[in-house]
Image (tube, rainbow, N blue to C red):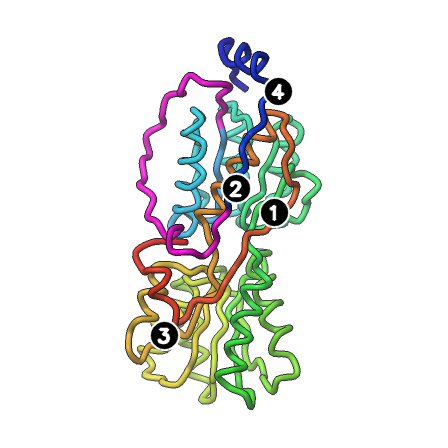
Amino acid sequence: MKKKIFGVFLAALFGCMMLAGCKKNVGTPEDNAVIETDEEETETNGEGDSYIFGYSCIDMGNPYFDILKESIRGELEDKGDTLIVKNPGFDAQKQNQQIQEMIEEGVDAVFLCPVDWVAVTPALEALDEAGIPVINIDTQVKEASLTEAYVGSDNKNAGILCGEDLINQYPDGGKVVILECPSQNSINERITGFEEKIKNAGFEVVVREDVGGIRSTAKEAMTRILASNSEIDAIMCGNDQIAMGALEAVNEAGRENIKIYGVDGSPEVKSELLKEGTSIIGTGAQSPINLGKTAAKIGRAILSREDYEKTTYIDTFFINRNNVEMYGTDGWQ
């Protein structure tokens, strides 16, 4: 890690000063901001220690991971730190290779959201051997002992909220399709929460399919499912990208009265909720802005040898047609 002599002097001089606490707002309109992106690395601000962090998340083509990146970057650059970003693009092997590149580039710590929560283990072992701490974000890794901290959304609650709404929509039950991704534990938790909620409520899961968390794959799968199932009341999707893929398939098939649920609270799904006749009913919303800010603070605390929470869950909440205008549609929470 890179330390500045002036910063060490200041740290010794003011080491007894207490840091002020930060208020956490989740799911409120003031959090629904669009973060300006800037891929240029910034110079250090000359105050205190500066660090180099790595960032590796499932796929930068997903807007959620881009806004999470920018939230982390903004918090770090205010302290003079640098963020190196790698995009594995849903490729678990590529993610492992890119993490090895980060090690060789001399990062001080890594923010990691695994493409596959098991396949990422060799990369975690390499980071551990190199003495580089891992801040596991959004989706948990299988070998949690190889990470310093976890910061993620309350994913199970997001699924529960979707299940509660479905029960309200269909008090007598119905037939459900589940589009999931078993290699991503965050999606597993959402689906588990959903299924636990609708259990014994008269619902039957007629089809479940692994779509890898990918929009185009979800559309292809849902097209096949619709062709062979004439009775479908609802589709539970592991994220909003899956939900939008399912929506495309439903619209092209001309199937009305199918209710689609997603998880994320993305601007695209929030905009869709305002359309008349849409099959998108709601989304278990996350706050990547708050998640990113929290993760960045914990990452700095780890390197600065300050106290930090080993496990942090950010609140999730349900957004539907009735409350979407409160959150806005032009940005994330």
Q: Is residue 182 above or below residue 11?
A: below
Which contiguous range is marked in magenta?
24-52
Q: Is residue 47 magenta?
A: yes
Res 115 label: none
Looking at the image, is mark 2 or mark 4 nearer the viewer?
Answer: 4
- The three-letter code of the residue at mark 3 reads Ala
What type is the residue that disc 1 sits on? Thr
Q: CA distance from mark 3 to mark 4?
A: 60 Å
Write down the residue under mark 4.
16
Sequence-wise first label, 1 or 4 = 4
Residue to which mark 2 is pinned: 294
Give the labeled residue for mark 1: 312
Q: CA distance from mark 2 to mark 4?
A: 23 Å
Residue type, mark 4 in image: Cys
Residue 249 numbered mark, or none: 3
Query: Residue at coordinates 55% horizontally, 45% vertically from top-left?
Result: 137
User: Could you tell me which secondary element the residue under label 3 belongs to?
Assistant: helix
- Give the x, y percent position of residue 308: 63, 36
Viewer-side residue, 171 vs 236: 171
Q: Which quadrant is home to the N terminus?
A: top right
| Label 4, residues with CA under 10 Å away: few <14, some 14-19, many ≥20 | few
Decide: marks 2, 1 in contact (CB < 8 A)?
Answer: yes
Q: Is residue 92 left or right of residue 40?
A: right
In the image, what residue occupies the spot 37% across and 60% down?
327
Callout 2 crowding tier (Cα within 10 Å): few <14, some 14–19, many ≥20: many
Q: Who comes first in sequence, dot 3 or dot 2?
A: 3
Q: Residue at x 65, y 37 (%)?
A: 148
Residue 64 is a magenta residue: no
Tag in front: 1 or 4: 4
**Residue in front for this viewpoint, 321 or 207:** 321
Main SS, magenta region, reads: loop
Mark 3 vs mark 2, CA separation in Å: 37 Å
